[in-house]
């Protein structure tokens, strides 16, 4: 899908050659001519209200070149209202299978965040998964033209950023949506190598022997029951203008999670193909960085394996030695994500990073705590936590800071190792984060638990691509140009 921005009035947009025209109508907007009269009459009769998502529809309206015309109320043009408006508009247009769409903003200036909200919401709503369908029905929408009365450089930058964000988000959705036999650790490694062909991006992939030489005993323990060999993926994006230490992103890459010997119930186990959504989000962020080419240095680490229950699988009660040298008593083999992430966190120390952020579908407890609205954010570094919270608010990819009191680590004590990998049901998302914190050392570290936000269940089952938007917003705020453009540069 290609985004464009053009300077056009409402009257000019009515002559646009696209298949459909969506006019985003903010509260209080007044326009002369037939369209303005149409909206005023509908409002007077109570058929058009200011609530975001309220619509007027017409087919073949005289004076409008597009076959389909939708006028959609969008409040004052805040991102949240625009998201509602665009979802409603696409819901009405989807059966028509339009190939090109013009979007006209009928108000004054539109903020960069609002522009991103319009375009990314349309992309999200129109996304279609096709990779493993025998008769796929791909997205028909190929061209989107956004028209504003006045177009500034900031508007153009917002459209460019939205285009890059959509590319990254859809790459993340693609890999998270693929069935586990089409998204093995090796498949993820090949996807990462493909990213390594982009300017500024390089990729290195380690196999079982290299991982064993590194002493990643915790990661190796999870992979023991899997026939598919593990992969440890190391991505690097580095601009020639980048200065200082990198930010390291660590994505959980469990390409399918049976629970191992601590087997999960059969119901909804198919959704455990989404257990590599953290890894998919790292791939997506690198896709977006390659498109934007910001002055940044970013590393991406993906420990990828299946968690399977064969005769070689790790058993409850086994003790393993992590790359850090700390020993772990594995009381529950279904708490495997933290076991692969801990070794990746130790590996990250070699880069002396500015910050380390791990992203994982880690705990069902986080779903209970926060549902599907906000991802769980854990960090003892106040500046890093605030920067991520700000990025979530800016992007609409929300998170919520959770506690990390030392008392929560009491349940991780073990008589047979330095720690256990679980601490009981109470505060399960917090104790999982406390486990990871033991391996973060002195690095500025944050953990994002995306178990509730990475995918949807039910009729709308599928990956969301979160938190690519949050991570990209955070990273771009670290670039030197972010300060020059007026954004606050954060730790």
Image: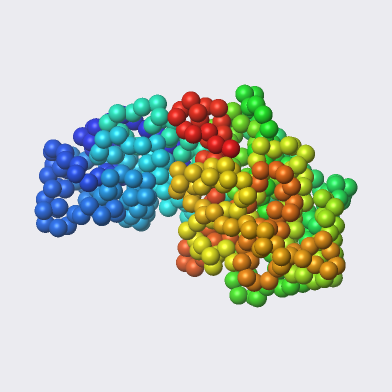
Given residues 421 and 193, the one toward you in this image is 421
The answer to whether residue 268 is above or below residue 175 is below
The residue shown at (50%, 56%) is 374
Given residues 329 and 17, the one toward you in this image is 329
Residue 408 in the figure: left or right of residue 420: left
Residue 308 in the figure: left or right of residue 426: right
The residue shown at (70%, 43%) is 443
Residue 38 in the figure: left or right of residue 346: left
Examine the rendering and report whether any part of residue 463 can be seen.
no
Given residues 226 and 111, the one toward you in this image is 111
Q: Check the picture and name the quadrant holding the C terminus.
A: top right
Examine the rendering and report whether any part of residue 367 can be seen.
yes
In the figure, residue 179 lies in which quadrant? bottom right
The answer to whether residue 372 is above or below residue 33 is below
The residue shown at (65%, 41%) is 355
Residue 286: x and y in percent read: 61, 40
The residue shown at (50%, 43%) is 391
């Amino acid at each position: 899908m290609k985004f464009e921005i053009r300077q056009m009035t409402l009257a000019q947009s009515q002559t646009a050659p696209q298949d459909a025209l969506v006019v985003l109508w903010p509260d209080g907007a007044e326009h002369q001519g037939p369209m303005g009269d149409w909206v005023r009459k509908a409002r007077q009769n109570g058929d058009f209200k200011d609530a975001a998502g309220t619509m007027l529809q017409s087919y073949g309206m005289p004076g409008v070149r597009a076959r389909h015309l939708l006028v959609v109320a969008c409040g004052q043009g805040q991102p949240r209202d625009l998201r509602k408006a665009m979802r409603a508009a696409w819901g009405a247009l989807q059966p028509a299978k339009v190939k090109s769409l013009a979007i006209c903003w009928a108000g004054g200036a539109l903020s960069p965040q609002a522009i991103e909200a319009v375009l990314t919401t349309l992309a999200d709503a129109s996304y279609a998964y096709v990779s493993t369908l025998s008769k796929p029905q791909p997205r028909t929408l190929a061209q989107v033209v956004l028209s504003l009365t006045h177009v500034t450089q900031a508007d153009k930058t917002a459209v460019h950023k939205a285009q890059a964000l959509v590319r990254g988000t859809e790459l993340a959705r693609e890999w998270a949506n693929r069935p586990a036999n089409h998204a093995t650790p090796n498949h993820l490694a090949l996807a990462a190598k493909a990213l390594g062909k982009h300017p500024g991006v390089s990729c290195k992939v380690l196999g079982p022997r290299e991982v064993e030489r590194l002493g990643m005993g915790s990661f190796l323990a999870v992979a023991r029951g899997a026939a598919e060999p593990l992969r440890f993926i190391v991505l690097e994006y580095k601009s020639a203008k980048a200065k200082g230490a990198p930010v390291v992103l660590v994505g959980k890459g469990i390409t399918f999670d049976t629970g191992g010997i601590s087997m999960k119930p059969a119901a909804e186990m198919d959704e455990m193909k989404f257990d590599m959504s953290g890894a998919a989000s790292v791939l997506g962020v690198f896709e977006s960085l390659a498109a934007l080419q910001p002055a940044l240095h970013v590393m991406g680490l993906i420990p990828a394996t299946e968690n399977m229950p064969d005769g070689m699988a790790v058993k409850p009660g086994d003790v393993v030695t992590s790359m850090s040298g700390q020993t772990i008593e594995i009381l529950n083999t279904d708490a495997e994500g933290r076991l692969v992430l801990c070794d990746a966190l130790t590996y990250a120390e070699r880069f002396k990073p500015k910050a380390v952020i791990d992203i994982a579908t880690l705990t069902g407890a986080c779903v209970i705590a926060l549902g599907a609205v906000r991802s769980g954010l854990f960090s003892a570094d106040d500046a890093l936590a605030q920067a991520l919270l700000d990025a979530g608010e800016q992007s609409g990819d929300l998170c919520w800071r959770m506690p990390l009191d030392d008392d929560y680590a009491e349940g991780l004590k073990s008589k047979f190792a330095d720690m256990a990998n679980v601490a009981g049901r109470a505060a399960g998302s917090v104790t999982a984060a406390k486990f990871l914190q033991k391996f973060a050392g002195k690095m500025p570290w944050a953990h994002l638990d995306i178990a509730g936000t990475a995918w949807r269940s039910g009729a709308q089952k599928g990956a969301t691509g979160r938190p690519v938007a949050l991570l990209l917003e955070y990273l771009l705020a670290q670039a030197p140009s972010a300060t020059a453009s007026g954004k606050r540069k954060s730790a």
